[in-house]
Amino acid sequence: MSNVLNKHRAKYLEGKTANYIPALAQVNPSLAGVAIATIDGDVVGAGDSRVPFSIQSVSKIFGLVMAMNRLGDDLWQRVHMEPSGQAFNSIIQLEWEKGIPRNPVINAGALLVADVLVSHYSASKLAVLNYVRRLADDESVFIDNAVFESELKHGSRNAALTYLMKSFDNIEASVPEVLDHYFTQCAITMSCEQLAKSMLFLANKGKNPCTGERVCSKKDAHRINAILSTSGMYDQSGEFAFSVGLPAKSGVGGAIVAIVPNYGVICAWSPPLNGFGNSVVGKHIIADLAEELGLSIY
Ligand SMILES: NC(=O)CC[C@H](N)C(=O)O
């Protein structure tokens, strides 16, 4: 794994850290890590695989599982499961489609999911943090308050998306409450090793392989992996399926998590992003590992 990391590490110079969230622009761009967790309990890492970073949109998966478990199939009346063909924070489609987001992993969809959580949990922020800590089996997972504040201050676009959905009666709670939950969830801070481990249930038909606990149904694990395959890398999801062939989710903190069904999870991290908002180095690392190990699901 270190050889793959070292081969691509210098390519961070080709990307740019997410400067629309000022706190993320301050992260050292040359950091890079990778970890693989397998369903039989091994976790191996290379590079900065234990350095915590802001997981950003990777958190949309945790929120989604919680909302699916709470709302069941009714969730899919309020958010769909098609690729958007637009940038992750695009607003243009949302009005044409009457306030129903294309899928739960673009910002509009994740804000809708945040509304479900705010409306169904008395302390939704604490609930999501505890949920992630349990999945990672690690109490050291935390919320980075500086990232939260930074995003709240520069969150006009996410506010606009939420108000637009509210105008179509697709948001139940107050918009500030939804944003507060969403930005908190995005500011969850974890390392590659913790993140890979916490997503193992998706590689194991919905069951946490370390504890045997059922995190979601087998059907819902299938559905989440399907959404990640078609939309998890935003408007680069087609190319990612074409060249890598794994369900995956990226975040603007520079993480990419790829699910390898019945095997494990790969998490790569390097902050500089390409024009789609996906980590440049992370994508190269996952592509090489998937090829070397023959992991494509297609
Ligand atoms: N792709 C991402 O990681 C986006 C999440 C980020 N918090 C935002 O709302 O813009």
Image (cartoon, helix red, strand yellow):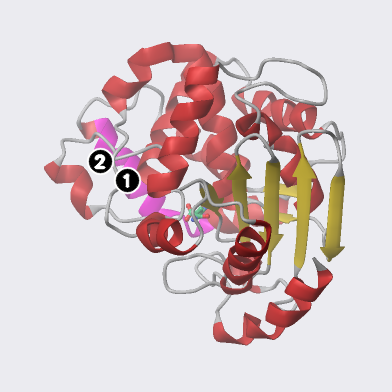
- Residue 194, image x, y percentages: 79, 44
Residues 227 and 290: in front is: 290
Is 231 above or below relative to 244? above
Q: Secondary structure at mark 1?
A: helix
Q: Residue at x 55, y 64 (%)?
A: 21
- Residue 199, image x, y percentages: 67, 37
Locate residue 55 relative to residue 252 in the image: left or right.
right
Q: Are marks 2 and 1 in contact (CB under 8 Å)?
A: yes
Which segment is the magenta one?
153-166
- Residue 182, image x, y percentages: 52, 40
Residues 71 and 235: in front is: 235
Is residue 155 on the magenta stretch? yes
Quarter the N terminus occupies: bottom right
Q: Say which residue label 1 marks.
A: 161
Marks 2/1: CA distance?
A: 5 Å
Is 29 above or below relative to 90? below
Locate residue 98 relative to residue 129 in the image: left or right.
left
Q: Residue at x 42, y 67 (%)?
A: 276
Is 261 above or below relative to 284? above
Q: Residue at x 76, y 25 (%)?
A: 209
Locate residue 217 relative to residue 71 in the image: left or right.
right
Mark 1, ligand 1, within 8 Å: the answer is no
Residues 213 and 66: in front is: 213
Q: Secondary structure at mark 2?
A: helix
Residues 214 and 133: in front is: 214
Q: Quadrant of residue 41?
A: top right
Q: Say which residue label 2 marks.
A: 164
Is residue 42 on the magenta stretch? no
Tag count in the figure? 2
Can residue 88 be seen here? The reply is no
Q: Amino acid at mark 1?
A: Leu
Q: Main secondary structure of the magenta part?
A: helix
